[in-house]
Amino acid sequence: MNTANDWLGLVNLLGNVGFPVLLAGYLMLQFEKRIQSLEGVVKGLRDELVDKEELEKKIEDYGKKLKEKEESKKTDVS
């Protein structure tokens, strides 16, 4: 009788604890996949922002050079 109670206790323990542990493990794996996907998207956005900042800096430098050329032409004509 004691062994039967032990088995029932083990089955009861697995029923009460095993399912939540299994569910938590499954959800962790699913969230890990989604987090990795989001990490890739964030890295892509970061790269685009860096490229955009570099392009804006080049445009600004080009604008400054054009202004300098215009100013030098004005001084040469005078």
Image: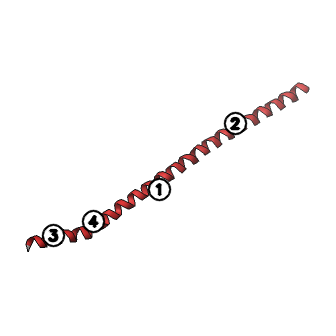
Residue 4 falls left or right of residue 66 = left
**Residue with the mark numbered 4:** 18
Point 83% across, 27% down: residue: 72
Q: How much space separates mark 2 and mark 4, taking CA atoms?
A: 60 Å
Q: Categorize mark 2 by other alpha carbons within 10 Å: few (<14), some (14-19), many (20+).
A: few
- Which residue is rendered at x = 31% and y = 66% of the image? 20
Give the x, y percent position of residue 52.
Answer: 65, 43
Question: For the residue marked with disc 4, what is the amino acid?
Answer: Gly
Residue type highlighted by circle 2: Lys
Mark identifier at residue 7: 3
Dots 3, 1 in contact, CB < 8 A: no
Q: Please, what is the three-letter code of the amino acid marked with disc 3?
A: Trp
User: Crowding near pointer 3: few (<14 within 10 Å), some, many (20+)?
Assistant: few
User: Gap between marks 4 and 1, in whole Å?
Assistant: 25 Å
Among numbered discs 2 and 4, the one appearing first in the sequence: 4
Pinpoint residue 38: horizontal percent, then vertical percent: 51, 53
For the residues labelled 3 and 1, the Cα–Cα distance comes to: 39 Å
CB-based contact (under 8 Å), mark 1 and mark 2:
no
Can you say whether 51 is above or below 13 in the image? above
Q: Please, what is the three-letter code of the amino acid marked with disc 1?
A: Arg
3 vs 4, front mark:
3
The answer to whether the residue labelled 3 contacts the one labelled 2, judged by CB atoms less than 8 Å apart, is no
Viewport quadrant of the N terminus: bottom left
The residue that disc 2 covers is: 58
Residue 25, horizontal then vertical, whole percent: 34, 59
User: Of circles 3 and 2, which is in front?
Assistant: 3
- Residue appearing at x 35%, y 64% in the figure: 23
Question: Which of disc 2 and disc 3 is earlier in sequence?
Answer: 3
69 over 42 or under it: above or below:
above
Mark 3, mark 1: which one is toward the viewer?
3
Label 3 or label 1, whichever comes before in sequence order: 3
